[in-house]
Image: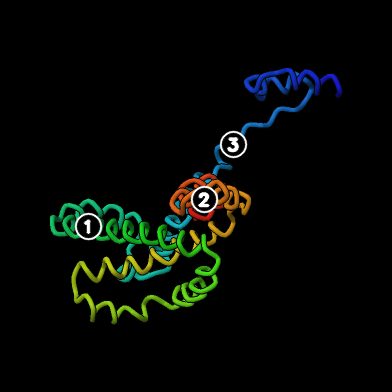
Amino acid sequence: MVNFVRRALNRSPADFAVGAIAEEGLPAQPGRNWFHLPVALRLGVILLVVIFWEIGARFYNDPDFLAPASQSIAALKYVLSDFEIIAALGMMSWELAVAFAMSLVAGLMLGMLVGINRPTYLTFFPIILMVYATPQITILPLFVLMFGIGPAVKVAFGFSHGFFPIIVNVIAGTQNINPTLMKSAQSMGASKWQIYRHASGHDGNALGGYSG
């Protein structure tokens, strides 16, 4: 064992491949089966849902109430051939993209401002959580009164759905930043923007919160 450690210290990082380690008498890591990958599991769940949908609609349900999966999939080509439906899907995609972009920018900026500073965190984070816990459907009439019926109300309502999950995750990520990095940046005269950009961006804990 001592000889193995000495030889390992004298090697370059490229030598530590699975095969090279296995030559020293250590078991190599077995290859992962494709069926164990998360993508395969998700596809399997979707396939099971489609199978249950097909069986349930054909044998345990009125076909006028719920069409089988095979008929629904076959009817897509007729539905998508309608120009009005294609135009509606395009408008919906545009509204969704605008709402997501607005919620992403606002959530990142305000989340950093609230999460980095301790006083703002203690002041505003409970309020954000309280508003986040409010069911969005209950305030839909207010959106209709303010923006009317049209694309604006859809974008605003989509923004309210995307903004709060993003800002909560960003605040949670900033709270996990290593305090040593913050103190080091402040002692070296870093500005607020530099702290936001570098100290938080290079901390793995903070990035984990942003990805959520």
Q: Position of residue 61 (x, y in %)?
A: 39, 69
Q: Secondary structure at mark 2?
A: loop
Q: Residue furthest right?
A: 2
Q: Amino acid at mark 3?
A: Asn
Q: Residue at x 38, y 75 (%)?
A: 136
Assign a secondary structure to mark 3: loop
**Circle 1 SS class:** helix
Residue for point 43% across, 64% down: 56
Q: What's the distance in space between the residues labelled 2 and 1, CA to CA?
A: 38 Å
| Front-lying residue, 105 or 212 | 105
Residue that carries the numbered disc 2 in the rendered image: 200
Which is in the foreground here, disc 2 or disc 1? 2
10 Å crowding of disc 3: few (<14), some (14-19), many (20+): few
Q: Which amino acid type is shown beneath numbered disc 1?
A: Leu
Name which residue lies at 25% across and 54% down: 76
Numbered circle sitting on residue 33? 3
CA separation in Å, label 1 and label 3? 38 Å
Residue 82: % across, % down: 15, 56
Q: Residue at x 32, y 56 (%)?
A: 101
Q: Which residue is mark 1?
A: 89
Quadrant of residue 89 within the rendered picture: bottom left
Instruction: Give the CA separation, mark 3 to mark 2.
Output: 36 Å
